[in-house]
Amino acid sequence: MQLTASPVKQLALQRGVPVLQPATLKTEEAQKEIAVLNADVMVVAAYGLILPQAVLQLPKRGCLNIHASLLPRWRGAAPIQRAILAGDKETGITIMQMDVGLDTGDMLLKKICEIKEGDTAETLHDKLAELGAQAIIETLQLVEQQQLRPEKQNDQLATYAAKLSKSEALLNWDTEAERLNRAVRGYYPFPVAHTTMGDTPIKVIRARVRKEDFGANAAGTVLAIDKECLWVACGKDVLGIEIMQKPGGKALPIAQFIQSFPIKIGDRFGVF
């Protein structure tokens, strides 16, 4: 519960690099602080706010954004999660020349990253963080050499990666199992896919899909339980839940989870 400097700030201070932390960049005071630096270029990573025009024009060569998608697909706040939720096979990093729009600036460099079957938003984030670091170094070298070739975005191909909400992570068992599995992966570690058993909310941490006809069982019904999975009927096919978490508890493999929270075949997840 103590305010702690981020690793970036700690390293900057160790190297004698000034650290500015304005609450907003819209004030004249904050803009003057940046102007004094007389920067050649500004690099923006996961800032979360649109930079005002007054700030964009301060560096001699403008502001570069490290964006975690292959623009113009997935402009906005949650590109990593939206790519997984949509079932995209690949994503990547786009280094973009910033303008006043929401991720609408010219594209300067792209790096592709495969989305693997087991990737969660957490694992994909970490891959893209590494890729983004490589990409921005390469881009800055091109800036210095004046070899950048900006490419306009095709607005007709743009999609929007809306900010995540907890409510959307509630699993709808009438949905096909593959889509539910993408929800489990895409919403981890935030806001985490969840469901209910009776009055108890339960988080679903990891799952798998089995293509199977489950007969006349209603969606959300527990069909079978083995050492690795709790198999649940969906709108199409079956979802095998491997790890779950109850309120106040730890995330547990299914064999351990049902020891403290008994679930039997025929029980049904969801609010009815």
Image (tube, rainbow, N blue to C red):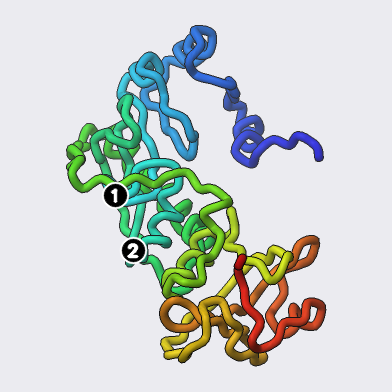
Q: What residue is pinned by disc 2?
A: 88
- Name which residue lies at 31% across and 38% down: 96
Quadrant of the image occupied by residue 17: top right
Residue 199, placed above or below residue 141: below
Q: Amino acid at mark 2?
A: Asp
Q: Amino acid at mark 1?
A: Arg
Callout 1–callout 2 Cβ contact below 8 Å: yes
Q: Quadrant of the C terminus?
A: bottom right
Q: Position of residue 238 (x, y in %)?
A: 49, 83
Q: Position of residue 19 (x, y in %)?
A: 59, 25
Instruction: Of the two numbered discs 1 and 2 on the same chain, state the one appearing first in sequence.
Output: 1
- Name which residue lies at 54% across and 58% down: 169
Of 245 and 198, nearer the camera is 198
- Other-residue count near label 2 (Cα within 10 Å), few / some / many at <14 / 14–19 / ≥20: few
Can residue 216 be seen here? The reply is yes
- Other-residue count near label 1 (Cα within 10 Å), few / some / many at <14 / 14–19 / ≥20: many
Q: Position of residue 5 (x, y in %)?
A: 69, 35
Question: Taking 270 as reference, is 217 left or right?
Answer: left
Q: What residue is pinned by disc 1?
A: 73
Residue 173, placed above or below residue 233: above
Quadrant of the image occupied by residue 65: top left
